[in-house]
Image (cartoon, grey):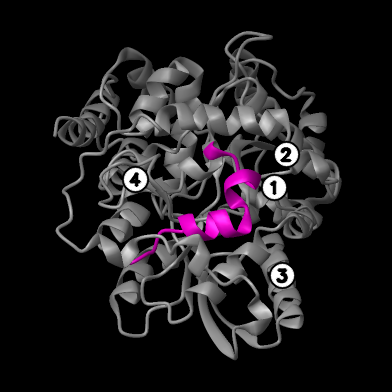
């Protein structure tokens, strides 16, 4: 584990470990989700008999799909007695269907569940996923994955506390939200990659004045605007305040001037015509695919697009962290881990399910991830980035980690913040609400949760 990753995840854990959740408690039986004692855990997958595991994941994009298909093929070759029945859906489809699937009689054995209170937290509270503590000890996840990484997939058994307690999921990838840019277009426009927010403002204005689309966004799913807002929020707000908002901790305020200023900036970009036409009704995938075909100059998005954009644009696409307010200043942006893999309480062979998770998060798996353009959540420094864009992304993750500038996703905050944030920002960008009223709506959700 390299120093920068420890720093990164430790930063996230500072917030997460102090989160005292306020979600309603569960009256269920904790024994259903208690960790298997280490002594009772079987780790020899070859001796588990014939097993078929149903696995739901959201690894659908090019590089994600390739790494997962490769790892499953390797797993089934290594353990021919275990077959993987894979159901792969987009992030949005998985979010919509997973809750129903988990409650059915034919529930999956392994699922990729969002870390959020609204998903993993609810699954823990409903006793629909099991603690992985026994497996963490048996497989050595508790030493290979630092506490700070495990903490963002940890809850108390009643789901009230997020960031500590038992481990309920294991992530494969790290994530950082930043700025993709069309390097060829910047050269044509005579623009250097912006090193400050003032330079970014100038770059956007220049691109617009020369007939280009400065910013590409697809926001019909509503959540992409949360990532956009997070980048702009980091321009104005302090990291400790964003962490409190993101982890649902009391002591911050959405209506603080810095957050209102971020909302005002987004509206000003709408007024100046910086976004592609119809962005609020455009699909996220259609938007970045349009960018990959040369439409637009900047795309504010996460490291998960690295492989697909590199394949489509080759050397014309580059990645950078959001600029600091002043040259040499501190950058703040959103990031953390990808969706963790969890074992459902209805898994008939949880030991086999754990063996599968161990395989796809192993040191060898991290190399497969990197080779296919994905950002490994651990042991990143041991991997070789596949290309120039990979070097940008890997380097950005290390830089922001070392600088303690990584802050949590804002929709982690409360069980309802995902819906509230998405709907509010979509209305803000459509100018249906003012920046002040938008921040007041987010404050209401946050305050109702933290006041309990």
In the rendered image, the vertical position of residue 146 relative to residue 201, given as above or below: below
Counting residues from the start of the chain, the first of labels 1 and 4 encountered is: 1
Q: What span is in magenta?
A: 127-147
Q: Distance between the Cα atoms at labels 1 and 4?
A: 26 Å
Along the viewing direction, whichever of 28 and 8 lies nearer the viewer: 28
Counting residues from the start of the chain, the first of labels 3 and 1 encountered is: 3
Counting residues from the start of the chain, the first of labels 2 and 1 encountered is: 1
Tell me the tag on residue 71: 3
The location of residue 216, given as percent across then percent down, is 57, 43
Report crowding for label 3: few under 14, some 14 to 19, many 20 or more residues within 10 A (C-alpha): many
- Give the labeled residue for mark 2: 393
Residue contact between numbered discs 3 and 2, judged by CB atoms under 8 Å:
no
Quadrant into which the C terminus falls: top left
Residue contact between numbered discs 3 and 4, judged by CB atoms under 8 Å:
no
Tell me the tag on residue 375: 1
Query: Which one is closest to the eye, mark 3 or mark 4?
Result: 3
Q: Relative to residue 344, is residue 141 drawn left or right? A: right
Along the viewing direction, whichever of 344 and 395 lies nearer the viewer: 344
Counting residues from the start of the chain, the first of labels 4 and 2 encountered is: 2
Q: Relative to residue 344, is residue 63 drawn left or right? A: right
Query: Which one is closest to the eye, mark 1 or mark 4?
Result: 1
Q: Is residue 135 magenta?
A: yes
Q: Is residue 26 visible?
A: yes
Helix, strand or loop at disc 1? Answer: loop
The location of residue 21, given as percent across then percent down, is 26, 38
Helix, strand or loop at disc 3? Answer: helix
- Give the labeled residue for mark 4: 422
Q: State the residue at coordinates (74%, 38%).
A: 394
Helix, strand or loop at disc 4? Answer: helix
Q: Distance between the Cα atoms at labels 4 and 2?
A: 26 Å
Counting residues from the start of the chain, the first of labels 3 and 4 encountered is: 3
Report crowding for label 4: few under 14, some 14 to 19, many 20 or more residues within 10 A (C-alpha): many
């Amino acid at each position: 584990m390299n120093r920068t990753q420890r720093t990164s995840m430790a930063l996230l854990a500072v917030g997460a470990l102090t989160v005292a959740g306020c979600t309603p408690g569960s009256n269920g039986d904790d024994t259903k989700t208690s960790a298997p004692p280490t002594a009772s855990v079987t780790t020899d997958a070859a001796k588990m008999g014939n097993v078929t595991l149903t696995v739901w994941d959201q690894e659908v994009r090019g590089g994600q799909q390739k790494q997962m298909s490769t790892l499953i093929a390797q797993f089934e070759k290594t353990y021919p007695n275990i077959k993987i029945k894979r159901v792969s859906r987009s992030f949005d489809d998985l979010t919509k269907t997973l809750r129903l699937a988990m409650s059915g009689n034919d529930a999956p054995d392994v699922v990729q569940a969002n870390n959020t209170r609204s998903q993993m937290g609810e699954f823990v509270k409903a006793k629909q996923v099991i603690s992985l503590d026994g497996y963490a000890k048996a497989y050595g996840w508790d030493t290979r994955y630092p506490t700070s990484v495990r903490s963002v997939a940890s809850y108390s058994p009643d789901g009230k506390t997020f960031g500590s307690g038992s481990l309920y999921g294991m992530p494969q990838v790290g994530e950082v939200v930043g700025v993709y840019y069309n390097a060829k277009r910047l050269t044509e426009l005579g623009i250097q990659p912006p090193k400050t927010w003032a330079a970014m403002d100038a770059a956007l204005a220049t691109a617009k004045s020369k007939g280009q689309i400065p910013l590409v966004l697809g926001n019909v799913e509503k959540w992409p605007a949360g990532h956009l807002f997070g980048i702009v929020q980091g321009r104005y707000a302090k990291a400790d305040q964003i962490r409190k908002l993101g982890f649902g901790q009391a002591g911050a305020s959405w209506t603080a001037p810095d957050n209102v200023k971020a909302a005002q900036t987004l509206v000003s970009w709408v007024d100046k015509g910086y976004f592609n036409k119809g962005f609020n009704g455009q699909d996220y995938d259609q938007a970045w695919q349009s960018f990959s075909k040369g439409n637009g100059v900047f795309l504010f998005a996460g490291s998960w697009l690295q492989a697909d954009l590199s394949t489509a644009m080759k050397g014309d696409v580059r990645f950078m962290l959001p600029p600091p307010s002043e040259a040499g200043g501190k950058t703040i942006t959103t990031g953390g881990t990808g969706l963790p893999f969890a074992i459902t309480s209805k898994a008939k062979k949880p030991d086999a399910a754990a063996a599968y998770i161990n395989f796809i998060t192993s040191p060898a798996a991290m190399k497969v991830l990197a080779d296919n353009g994905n950002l490994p959540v651990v042991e990143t420094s041991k991997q070789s980035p596949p290309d120039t864009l990979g070097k940008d992304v890997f380097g950005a993750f290390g830089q922001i980690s070392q600088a303690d500038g990584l802050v949590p996703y804002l929709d982690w905050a409360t069980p309802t913040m995902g819906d509230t944030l998405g709907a509010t920002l979509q209305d803000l960008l459509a100018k249906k609400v003012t920046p002040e009223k938008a921040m007041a709506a987010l404050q209401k959700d946050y305050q109702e949760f933290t006041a309990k």
